[in-house]
Image: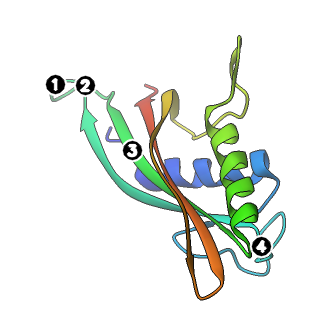
Amino acid sequence: MAVSGRVLSLAVQAMLATSTGRSCGYGAAPTASSLPTGAATPYSVLYPVGSTSDGPPFGDASADARIIYQVTSVGTTAEQAEWMADKVRAGILTRTPAGYTYSITATGYVVMARELDKEEGVTAASGVYSYVQRFAIEVTTLS
């Protein structure tokens, strides 16, 4: 079975909202009804950028994928955008001896690894500040 990008994206989005305590949009800014903080800044936006798959020969039900996500942290000041980016980074990468502090729970999959792929830092446009980060999430299917 191939890895479903949508299933993993929704799991990453939920983990970011939990770990940061701020709303996370999926491809767009969060709406007023988004949990936990609606469209109030700061917030983050998750963008699936692409993936690569590898895995078993034909006929085997398991598969692996490396999915790249861009997370854009948005604030009304540079400091606020950077603060949000710090929370995103910590949510995705912080570990304890038992594993990652915030789990990415996607039915049918196990997250094997997470890594920071790239950070572009703060930019400003029309009084809105954003901080762009890219992360790689490696998953495998459960069979």
Task: Say whether disc 3 or disc 2 marks the residue closer to the N-terminus.
Answer: 2
User: Which residue is drawn at the image coordinates 71% and 11% (left, top)?
Assistant: 97
State left or right for residue 134 relative to residue 12.
left
**Mark 1 in CB contact with mark 2 (< 8 angstroms):** yes
**In the rendered view, would you say 109 is above or below 132?**
above
Task: Say whether disc 4 or disc 2 marks the residue closer to the N-terminus.
Answer: 4
Residue 12 appearing in the image: yes
Crowding at mark 3 (Cα within 10 Å: few <14, some 14-19, many 20+): many
Q: CA distance from mark 1 to mark 2?
A: 6 Å
User: Which residue is drawn at the image coordinates 79% and 77% (left, top)?
Assistant: 33
**Mark 1 in CB contact with mark 4 (< 8 angstroms):** no
Task: Say whether disc 1 or disc 4 marks the residue closer to the N-terminus.
Answer: 4
**Rendering coords of residue 34 (x, y %):** 76, 71
Q: Secondary structure at mark 4?
A: loop
Crowding at mark 2 (Cα within 10 Å: few <14, some 14-19, many 20+): few
Which residue position holds label 4? 41
Look at label 3 and name its amino acid.
Ile
Which residue position holds label 3? 67
Give 82 or 3, whichever is nearer the viewer.
Answer: 82
Q: Secondary structure at mark 2?
A: loop
Q: Residue furthest bottom?
A: 126
Give 127 or 108, whichever is nearer the viewer.
Answer: 127
**In the rendered view, would you say 128 is above or below 95?**
below
Of badges 3 and 4, the one in the foreground is: 4
